[in-house]
Image: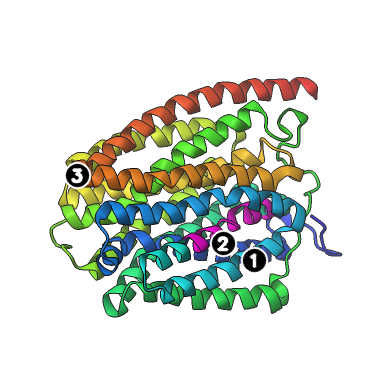
Amino acid sequence: MVRRKGETPSPGGEMTSRERWILLTLSVCHALVHLYMLIFPTVYKSLGSALKLEFAGVGVVGMASYMAFGFGSLPAGFLSDHLGSRMLLILCMAGTTLASVAVFAARTPAGVVIGLVLLGLAASMYHPAGLSLLSTSIRDLGRAMGIHGMAGTLGVACGPVVAGTVTARMGWSYSYLLLGVVGGAILVMLLVVPGFRLGSGKIPGDQTGDCEVDRGFGRHLVLIYIIGAVYGLIYRGILTFFPSYLSERVGFIGDDVGRLGLLSSGIMGVSVVGALVGGYLASSRRMIERNLLMVFAVLAVLSIGFYFLAGIGLILVAVPTVLLIFSFQPLQNSLLARSSHHSRRGAVYGINFTVSFGIGAFASGVGGVFGQSFGLSSIFLFMLGLCLIQIGLIRISTTMGDKNESYRMSQL
C-alpha cells in the first residue's frame, strides 16, 4: 500500500488514518451485504404464504439466490484483480440496491426468484473485492479481519429483527425496499465522500504468504477451499432453518414473526463476539488450523443438542453455536492470505467464496426437503455429519500446513 507523505504506522501497531478509513468503508459494506442475505430466513414462512409455495418450494427459491451469491464470487474475484476493488464495490452497492427494489416490486413467484437471484449476484461481488483490499492494505491483518468480520456479523444479527419488525407491520417485501434505500445512500458515499475513496497495493514487509509454492492454487489452497465448502453447507444450513426451528420448538414464539425476529437477532448478536474471537485466534499462523479443529469439534456436540432440545435449552445451545460459526471466517480468511500471493488475492478469495457460498446454497434446498420429509430436527443430524467430515479435513490440512512451513523455513 502506498502511504501518504508523513503517514507512518504509530507505535504499538496502530492503524494509520487511511487504514482506518478503508476498514470503516469495508465494514459498512460488509454489514449491509449480510443484512441483504439474512432477510430471507426470517421471512421464509411469510414469503411462502404470500406466494402460495410449500415449505420445500420456498427452500428452492432461497437456494437459487444463495447459489448466485456463492457462484458469482468466482468471476467477481478475477474482476477484482483486473478492474480494481473500488470499482467492484461500487458495482456491488449499485446492483444490490436495484435488485432489492426489484424484489419489492415483484408480484409473482418468477419475479421474486429473478429479483433474489440478481440480489445474490450483486452481493457476490463484495467478498472477493473487500477481502482482497483488506488483506493488501492493512498490516495488522488478524485484528482487521476480526473487526471486519464483526461488522458482517452485526449485519447478520440485525437482519432478523429488521426483517421481522418490518414484515410484521408492513409485509415481507418492504424489508427489501428498506435496505435498498440504505444501499443507495452507501453508494452515494462511495462515489462522492472523499474519505471513502479507496486504493490498494502490496504492503511493504507484510506477513502474508507470497511464496511460489502457493502462488496461485497449490494443494494446500485447494484443501482450504474444500474446508470452506463444507463450512458453507453448515453455515447456510443452520442459519436458514434455525429461525423456523425456534418458532416450532420454543413455545412462546409460535407464529409471531416479530417475536421470532427479536429472539433470532438476540441470539445472532453473539456473532459479533465470534468474529472478534476468530480474529484473535487467527493472530498466530501456526495455531489457525488447530483452532479451527477445536471450533468444529464443539460444533459437532452442539448439533446433537439442537436435535434433542427445545425451549430455553435450545436457546442456550443456539448461542455458542452462532458464536463458533462466525469465528470461522476470520480464521479462514487469514489462513488464505498467508497461503497465497498478493497479486492473486482477489481470485483466491473469489474461488473460496464461490465454493463456500455456492456449494453452501444447496443446504437451503436439501434442508427444505429434509425438513418437509423428516422434520426440521433432521437437518441438524445432517449438520453433525458435516462437522465430523470437517474435523477430518482440518486434520489433513494441519499436517500439510506444517510441511509447507518447514519447506518455507528451509528456503530462508
135 or 188, which lies in front? 188
- Determine which of the numbered discs, if any, sits on residue 122 in the image: 2
Quarter of the image with the C terminus in it: top right
Quick one: SS at disc 2? helix
Q: Residue at x 51, y 39 (%)?
A: 228
**Is the residue under label 2 in contact with that under label 1 (CB below 8 Å)?**
yes
35 or 52, which lies in front? 52
Callout 2: few (<14), some (14-19), or many (20+) C-alpha neighbours within 10 Å? many
Q: Position of residue 235 (x, y in %)?
A: 41, 46
Among numbered discs 1 and 3, the one appearing first in the sequence:
1
Quick one: SS at disc 3? loop
Quick one: SS at disc 1? helix
Q: Position of residue 363 (x, y in %)?
A: 38, 44
Residue range (magenta): 117-133
Among numbered discs 2 and 3, the one appearing first in the sequence:
2
Callout 1: few (<14), some (14-19), or many (20+) C-alpha neighbours within 10 Å? some
Residue type beneath disc 2? Ala
Q: Residue at x 35, y 47 (%)?
A: 365
Quarter of the image with the N terminus in it: bottom right
Query: Does residue 222 appear left or right of residue 207 in this picture?
Result: left
- The Cα–Cα distance between marks 1 and 3, rounded to whole angstroms, is 40 Å
Residue type beneath disc 3? Gly
- The Cα–Cα distance between marks 2 and 3, rounded to whole angstroms, is 33 Å
Callout 3: few (<14), some (14-19), or many (20+) C-alpha neighbours within 10 Å? few
- Quarter of the image where one finds residue 30: bottom right
Magenta stretch encompasses residue 129: yes
Name the residue that disc number 1 marks.
91
Q: Residue at x 13, y 58 (%)?
A: 251
Magenta stretch encompasses residue 339: no
Name the residue that disc number 3 marks.
375
